[in-house]
Amino acid sequence: MWMSKEISVAVIGYGYWGPNLLRNFQEADGIRVAVCCDQDPQRLARAKTRSPGVEVTTNFRDVLSHSGVDAVAIATPVHTHYDLAMQALQAGKHVLVEKPMTNRVDHAQELIELARKKGLVLMVDHVFVYSPPVVKMKEIIESGKLGSLYYIDSVRINLGLFQHDINVVWDLAPHDLSIVDYLLGRLPRSLATVGSVHADHDVEDVAYLNMDFGEGLLANFHVNWLSPVKVRHMIIGGSEQSLIYNDLENSEKIKVFNRGIAVATGTEQRRQVLISYRSGDVWSPKLSTEEPLARMTAHFASCIQEGSRPVTDGESGLRVVKILEAAQRSIKAQGGRVVL
Amino acid sequence: MWMSKEISVAVIGYGYWGPNLLRNFQEADGIRVAVCCDQDPQRLARAKTRSPGVEVTTNFRDVLSHSGVDAVAIATPVHTHYDLAMQALQAGKHVLVEKPMTNRVDHAQELIELARKKGLVLMVDHVFVYSPPVVKMKEIIESGKLGSLYYIDSVRINLGLFQHDINVVWDLAPHDLSIVDYLLGRLPRSLATVGSVHADHDVEDVAYLNMDFGEGLLANFHVNWLSPVKVRHMIIGGSEQSLIYNDLENSEKIKVFNRGIAVATGTEQRRQVLISYRSGDVWSPKLSTEEPLARMTAHFASCIQEGSRPVTDGESGLRVVKILEAAQRSIKAQGGRVVL
Amino acid sequence: MWMSKEISVAVIGYGYWGPNLLRNFQEADGIRVAVCCDQDPQRLARAKTRSPGVEVTTNFRDVLSHSGVDAVAIATPVHTHYDLAMQALQAGKHVLVEKPMTNRVDHAQELIELARKKGLVLMVDHVFVYSPPVVKMKEIIESGKLGSLYYIDSVRINLGLFQHDINVVWDLAPHDLSIVDYLLGRLPRSLATVGSVHADHDVEDVAYLNMDFGEGLLANFHVNWLSPVKVRHMIIGGSEQSLIYNDLENSEKIKVFNRGIAVATGTEQRRQVLISYRSGDVWSPKLSTEEPLARMTAHFASCIQEGSRPVTDGESGLRVVKILEAAQRSIKAQGGRVVL
Amino acid sequence: MWMSKEISVAVIGYGYWGPNLLRNFQEADGIRVAVCCDQDPQRLARAKTRSPGVEVTTNFRDVLSHSGVDAVAIATPVHTHYDLAMQALQAGKHVLVEKPMTNRVDHAQELIELARKKGLVLMVDHVFVYSPPVVKMKEIIESGKLGSLYYIDSVRINLGLFQHDINVVWDLAPHDLSIVDYLLGRLPRSLATVGSVHADHDVEDVAYLNMDFGEGLLANFHVNWLSPVKVRHMIIGGSEQSLIYNDLENSEKIKVFNRGIAVATGTEQRRQVLISYRSGDVWSPKLSTEEPLARMTAHFASCIQEGSRPVTDGESGLRVVKILEAAQRSIKAQGGRVVL
C-alpha cells in the first residue's frame, strides 16, 4: 500500500476531554499531535510534562497560522465550538469537534456549508458511535432480527457534575441522541421535553425527552444529574425480538431477547385469539474489545487521508443539535410538543 | 375486648384476582366469605371445590338480597365496577372494589356520594398501599429524611397480558399511581401522556405519563406491555436523601441513599462554589413480612366493624381515576398537557 | 390409548413438604390421594379442611392395611424413612420417599433389594431433577457442547432453618448432590468435608464438600445456614464452554458461555504460546415453565402404571446417601479424605 | 512542619505492575523515581517515553551502586524477589516487594532478619490492604459490630492469565490471604488445599483453600483461572452481624447485614426454643475514594522518613508465604491437612 502522509493535529482545550484525545491521537497510526492549545498555562504545563514532544500555546492564532498543522480537534466548552471551528476551517484545517457540535442549529449549518466549500473533513466526536456495543446494535438492527422497531427507552442518570452554562439535556442527552441517530439515521418527527430545576436557579437537572419517530416508533430519554445511582441503559423493542444495552454491565453489555408478541391478522376470529406471546432464548453477542476513542481518532485520520465522509459527519452533529434546540424550546413551553 | 360481630362478605368475580381475595378473606379474623358470585359456572365449580363451605351463584341479585351478606368485594372487569358497586351500596352492603375504581370520574364521585349518604364503607383495592415496602416509604418520607421531594421516576414494564377493553395505562399505571397517591396524598397539577399502539389496533401497549406535582416535584411513569424484561422500580429523589424501591429485589426492596447535592445560599461567592456533592451511607431498612392482601382484607373488616375510613378510601380511588382519565385525554391529544 | 387404572396414594407426613406433595398428587392425572397420615391431629385437621375428600389417620398401620392404597409418599423426618418405607414395601405398596432417602447406606440398600424382590416402584423425591433448568443442563452436557468437564462449583447458602436431628450437610447438600448425580450418573472417587459448629452444640451449620470425580473433574459444594444472603448458584466449567445455573434468577436461570482456553498440543513451540483465550457469545436457553413437583408426581404415577424405573430411583437415592455418610465421616476426621 | 528529605526510589521491573508503581511514586509527595530497571530494552524505551526524567538501566548493579537511590520497589517475577531484595538490603536500600514476598518461607525470614539488622524498611505490596473497602472492613470488625467471627468465604475467579512459573494459588490467593491477614493478624492453625490441573501439564488452574483459624472460625478460598465470569466476593459471617465485600460492585462494595441467629443459653427449655432468627437493616457505609496504590506508595515513603513499621511489613508477607507453601504441600498430598 502506498503510505499516506502522516496527519498532524492540534488539540484545542486541555481540560477534561482534551487529554484523552491527545493521548489517543498519539497512539493512533497515521496521525500525530503537533500542538496543544489552552488558555490556561497550568494545563499546558501539565500537557508538556506528559507529552514533552508537543508544542504548547495559549494563542489559538498560533495554531491557525501553523503550516505544520493539518487538522484541529476542539475540546472546549460548547459555546466556543462555532467560533473556533469556523476559524479553523477558514484557515484550511480539517476539524473534529466535541459534542454537541454547536449550541445553535444555524451555526452547525454554517460549519457544514463551509467545510463542503473548502473540501475539508468536518467530524463530530460522537464517541459512543465508535464503541463495540453500539456498533453491534447497529449490525443487529440492520440484520432485521428485531423486526419493526416499536420503542426505544433510554436512561442515563447519575449524581452528576453540575455545569452552569448548560443543562442536563445538553450535557447528557447528546450521548444517547448520537447513538440513536447512528442507529436510525433520521430525525424524529416531533418531540416533547419536560425538565425541572432544583439545585441551581435556572439550569434543569432532571429531564425527559419524548420523541415520535413515525411508523409507530416512540423514543423516550431520561437524563438526570440527581440520581443516587448510575444507570446507562437502553431498551429497543421490536416486533420480532428486543434488545437491551447496559453500558455498565461488564461482560454482557448487549442482550437480544427472542421474546415478544405474535399478532395474526386477516382472520375472522375474535381479536383475543390473535395475539399470543412468544418466549425464546436470550443471546449476548461477543463484542470487540477495541477502545471507542482509539477507533474514533483513527477514523478521523483515515477520513482526512482518503477524503472520505466520517460516520459522524457534520450532518449527524446537526441532527443532534436540532433535537437539543427543539428540546430546549419544548422545556420553555412547559413540555409542549415541537415538530422538527 | 368486646368481640365484634363477624363480617360476612360476598366475592364478586372469580377470575384472576377473585380467588386471592376469597382465600385472604377466609384466613382473616373477623370476616368470613358467605357467597361467591360469577357469571361462569365453571369458575364457580372451581370455587366450590376449593372452598366447599361457600355458597355460589351466577346471579348478582342473589347477593344483593342475601340478608347474611354485609359486604361485597368486586373483582370483575373495570367497566362493570360502577354498576355492581352502585347496586351493592343501594342494597346496604359495604363495598371493596378492585382498582381502578371505575372507568369514569363521575361514576367514582357518585359511588363516594352514595356510600357517604348510606354510611357504608367504600374501599378501593389499592393493594400495594398495604405492602411493607410502600408502608416503609411513606414512613421515611413523612420522617422528613428525604427533604423536599425533587422527582419520582417509576418503571413498571414486562411482557404483559394484553387486555382488549383497557390499554396499558389503565392496566399497569393504577399500581404506581395508587402508591404515589398514598405517599403524597394529592393530585398532580397537570400531566402529559404519550402512548403508542403496536400489537393491537387501538390499544396502547407502551406509554409514558409525566406529571407536575408543583413545588418542583416532577413524576414520570413508564408502563409497557412489550418489554423483554420485567422491571418494577421507583426512584424518589429528595433534597437531602434519595430512595429506591425495587419490588423485584428479594432482600433489599428499599434503599435510602444519603447522597445528593448541597446548595449553599446567601453568600457572595460565585455560584459554582455554592453547589457541592455529598456522598454517604446506603441504608436498607428491615421490612415487615406481612402479606399485603392479608393486611388489606383485615383492614376492610376492621373499617366496617369500627365504622372508620379506609386508608384507600373512595377519594383515593377517585384521584387515581382522575389521573387515568386525564392521561387518556392527553394521549388522544398527542401528548398535550392536561390540567387537573 | 387404553386408560390405565387410577393410582391411589397415601401421603405420610403433613408437615412442611407433605401438603405440597398432596396438592400435586391431587392435580396430577392418573393418580389420586386416598389417605393422609400424620401423628399430629392438628395437622390432619388442616389437611381435612383443605382436602375434604381425603381420609385422615394418625395410625400408619391403617395405611398399610388399606386395600385401596397402591402407593405411599413418605414426607417425614429422615430418621423415620427406613422403617416407614420398609413396612410399606412389605405391605406391597409402591414408595416415594423424601430426600435424603435414608440416614444409613445399608438401609438404602435394603430398601432397594426389597423393592426389587417385590417388583415395586421405589422412587426418591429428588425434586430438582424434575426442574426445567436442571433438565436443560443435562441436555446441554449430553450434547457435548461443554466438552470435558473440568470443575463444578456449587453454592447453596441462606439464613437457614435450623434442624436439630441433622446438620447443614444432610439438610442442604442433597439438593445439589442429586442434581450432580443426575448430570454425571456416577459417584465421586473420594471426598473431603469440613464443617463447623457455631449456633448449636453439635450440629454443623457451615460446611464445604470437596469431591474428586476422576478424569480431572473437581466438584466443590458450599452449604451454609448462616449466610446473610440467599444464593443458589452452580458453575460447570468445561474444556469447550462453561455453564452457570442461578436458580434465583428470574428469566435467565441457565447461561452458557462460549469462553475458555484453547490448548494446542503436539508442536515444538514453547508452552507459553500454546495456551490462548477464547471469548464468544453468551446464550441463555428458553426453559419450560413446568412445575418440578407436578412433573415428579406424574412421573411416579406413570412408573407405577408402566412398571418402569424412575429417573430418581433407589440407586440414585443410595448414591446420595453414600456421599452424605462419607461426608459425615470426613467431618469427624477433621476433613480427612474418604474414598468411596 | 519540618520538611523531610525527598526519598528517591528505583522501580525494578517494568512489565505489568511496574508502570503502575512508577506512576504512583511520581505523583506521591515526598518521594520521586530516580531509576527504572528492566532487562528488556524495549520496556525501558517505553518507560523513557512516558517518563523522560527517569534514568533507565538494564543492569540491577547500577541501581545498587547508585548513591542517589534510597529505596527499591521490586515488581519482577516471584522467583527473583529474594535475590533482588537481598542485594538491595545489603546495599542499604529500603525495599518494597511485590506479593507474594518470596516463593520460600526461609527466604522471607532471611529478608526480615537482614532488614532488621540493617534498620531498613521492608514492605510488601499487599495493595488491597490499602483499599478503602478493606480498611472499612477492618474498622467494622475491630468495632465488634460483627461479634465473634464464624466463617469467611472468599471467591476470586475469572478467565485468567495463565502463568507458567506459578499456579492459580500463588497467583490469585495472595490478594485474599493478605486481606484476611490484615483483618485477623494471625495465621490459621491448619489448612487443606485441593487443586486441579486442566489446561497446562502441571500448573493448577482451579483450587480451594480451606483453613481453620481456631475459635470456631473457618475460612474458605476459591481461586480459579477457568471461570466464565469474574467474581471478587467475600462473606464474613459473625455471631451478631455479617458483612459482604463485593469488589466489583460500583457503589456498595461493603454491606453489613444485621441478620443472624440468636442463641439463648442457661435455661431449661428445649433446645429448639433457644435458637431464633434475627432480621434487621442492611447498611452500606460510605467509602473513601482514595486510590489504594497511591496510599500504598505514600505509606512506603512515610515509613522510610519516619523510620516506622509498615502495615504490610515483612512479617505479614511471611505469613502469606507460609500459607502458600503449606497450601502447596497440601495439594501435593491430595488435599491432606497441613498444620501451620
Image (tube, coloured by chain):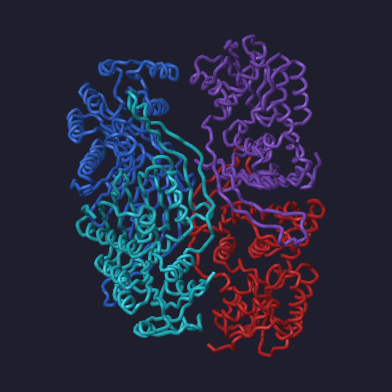
Chain colours: A blue, B cyan, C red, D purple
- The residue shown at (26%, 46%) is A193
- The residue shown at (22%, 52%) is B337
Q: Position of residue C183 (x, y in %)?
A: 63, 63
Q: Is residue A276 left or right of residue C270?
A: left
Above or below A327: residue B17: below
Can I make out residue D206 in this image?
no
Image quarter in which the C terminus of chain C is found: bottom right
Q: Position of residue A59 (x, y in %)?
A: 29, 15
Residue C338 or D311: which is nearer the viewer?
Answer: D311
Q: Is residue D80 left or right of residue B45?
A: right
**Farthest residue in the top direction?**
D67
- The residue shown at (57%, 48%) is C260
Query: In which quarter of the view is residue D217 placed?
Result: top right
Above or below C211: residue A119: above
The mark tally for this picture is 0
Above or below B95: residue B57: below
Residue D186 or A133: which is nearer the viewer?
Answer: D186
Query: In which quarter of the view is residue A264 placed?
Result: bottom left
Query: In which quarter of the view is residue D175 placed?
Result: top right
Q: Is residue B262 left or right of residue D68?
A: left
Residue B3 or A61: which is nearer the viewer?
Answer: B3
Q: Position of residue D51 (x, y in %)?
A: 50, 18
Q: Is residue D181 left or right of residue B59?
A: right
Q: Position of residue A44 (x, y in %)?
A: 38, 17
Can I make out residue C162 in this image?
yes
